[in-house]
Amino acid sequence: MDENTLKILTESAKYDVSCSSSGSDRGAHGKVGNTAFSGICHSFTADGRCVSLLKILLSNKCSYDCLYCVNRRSNDIPRASATPDEICSLVMNFYKRNYIEGLFLSSAIEKSPNHTMELLLETVRRLRKLYAFNGYIHLKGIPGADPVLLEQAGRLVDRMSFNIELPSERSLKLLAPQKSKVSIFTPMKDTALQYQTAKSERNNRFLPAGQTTQMIVGASPESDGLILRLTEGLYRKFSLKRVYYSSYIPANFKTSLLPTKPTSLLREHRLYQADWLLRFYGFSADEILDENENLDESVDPKCHWALKHMELFPLEVNVAPPELLVRVPGIGFRSVEKIIRARRYTKLDFADLYKMRVVVKRAVHFITCNGKFFGKENPSAVKNLIALTDGGLGYEQLNMFSTPDVYRSIIGGQL
């Protein structure tokens, strides 16, 4: 593969964020590469290892004309495609040089779904059988391809993703007329059933890391509520490992059907926070949405829920049940475990919570310690203070050398 082809195919792959290496049981292989090459992304496994993945398309010669996509048929951009052997050779050479530990392989729809899926399948089959590559592989499934091809690919790779891209059938018809929800949900459902069946097999090699999907946020007018309810259904019906959200980036200024400005990264960030609450904290979408069916961008979803239910607070840390403590802003599962263990032996105060790495500047408005309360009672004042300490609607670079002064100022120097 020449340098120009490599540049085109890695650049074209950067918009697909449904890429993660967690959940696989293939184990570590060699050392972790560290490189700034545009086609390599870094992901983290469940045990904390950083894994470098080569992120590349097999082809960007798309026969579809999705208006939001940079690789759409009508877009005048450089085109390229690679053969299965070229991808395999590239992966093995990068792997031997410690640039990567795995592969994320996707493709535009070249000629037809079946033709494209056959090439993807041949690529991963050669990697596994001919090149004896046992590293991590995340493969983009092609909706509309023969189920036999998809099932065979699932036996060879670690994870597969079928990207929904747009949250509603109406938006798909308008912006991606060659796609439909049925063509996407059908392979997702079949894959989920095969995954559950394979779990009972002694030597289960069918998608050990499960399946994921991705939605573009802001290309179409759907609310956060519609997106999160769809997400709830996907986790419940198809046992997805992750739903990824990608802020819309304008790639087509020749149509009035798409926004001319990119979607706020803060909206994407809030969706990821809400997704975390859905997956791990037992929240429902209805609990964390505002009256306009969207997420409050001024505070995170957990804070928004707490501010709507101030009648439940403040909770006494020394006696409150864990299922309520974990819903306090600034207190997560690990902090709750520490609190439950520690309060068996002593009465906890705010200094103890600070040592446990509780985010006291948030939690202080919703808890008491030994009956002492140092927060604000008015929901509007609490919201303003939390938004202020979070830096408003902007972002702040993490400071590894932060001092506890902010905590001392909040609770009157009691730490």
Image (tube, helix red, strand yellow):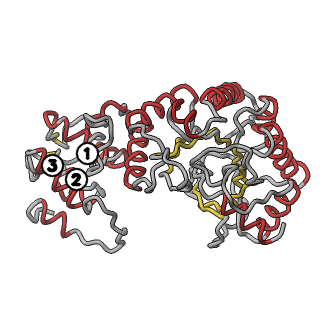
Please give the residue where the numbered disc 2 appears in the rendered image: 362
- Please report the residue visible at 47 percent of the width from the left and 41 percent of the height from the top: 220
Label 2 amino acid? Arg
Q: Which residue is mark 3?
A: 365
Q: Quadrant of residue 261?
A: bottom left
Q: Are the two marked residues, 1 and 3, in contact with CB atoms closer than 8 angstroms?
A: no
Out of 261 and 329, give the one closest to the viewer: 261
Mark 3 residue crowding within 10 angstroms, few (<14) / some (14–19) / many (20+)? many
| First in residue order: circle 1 vs circle 3 | 1
Image location (x, y in percent) of residue 105: 72, 52
Structural crowding at the residue carrying mark 2, measured as other residues with C-alpha within 10 Å and reported as few (<14), some (14–19) or many (≥20)? many
**Residue type, numbered disc 1:** Cys
Where residue 303 is drawn, which disc sits there? 1
The amino acid type, in three-letter code, at marker 3 is His
Q: CA distance from mark 1 to mark 3?
A: 10 Å
Q: Position of residue 1 (x, y in %)?
A: 84, 66
Task: Indicate the secondary structure of the residue bearing disc 1.
Answer: helix
Left or right relative to 226: residue 34: right
Q: Is residue 205 left or right of residue 84?
A: left
Q: Position of residue 116 (x, y in %)?
A: 80, 43
The C terminus - image quarter:
bottom left
Instruction: Residue 333: give its label.
Output: none
Q: Is residue 239 visible?
A: yes
Quick one: label 1, few (<14), some, or many (20+) residues within 10 Å?
A: many
Seen as rendered, the residue at the extreme right is 130
**Tags 1 and 2 in contact by the CB under 8 Å rule?**
yes
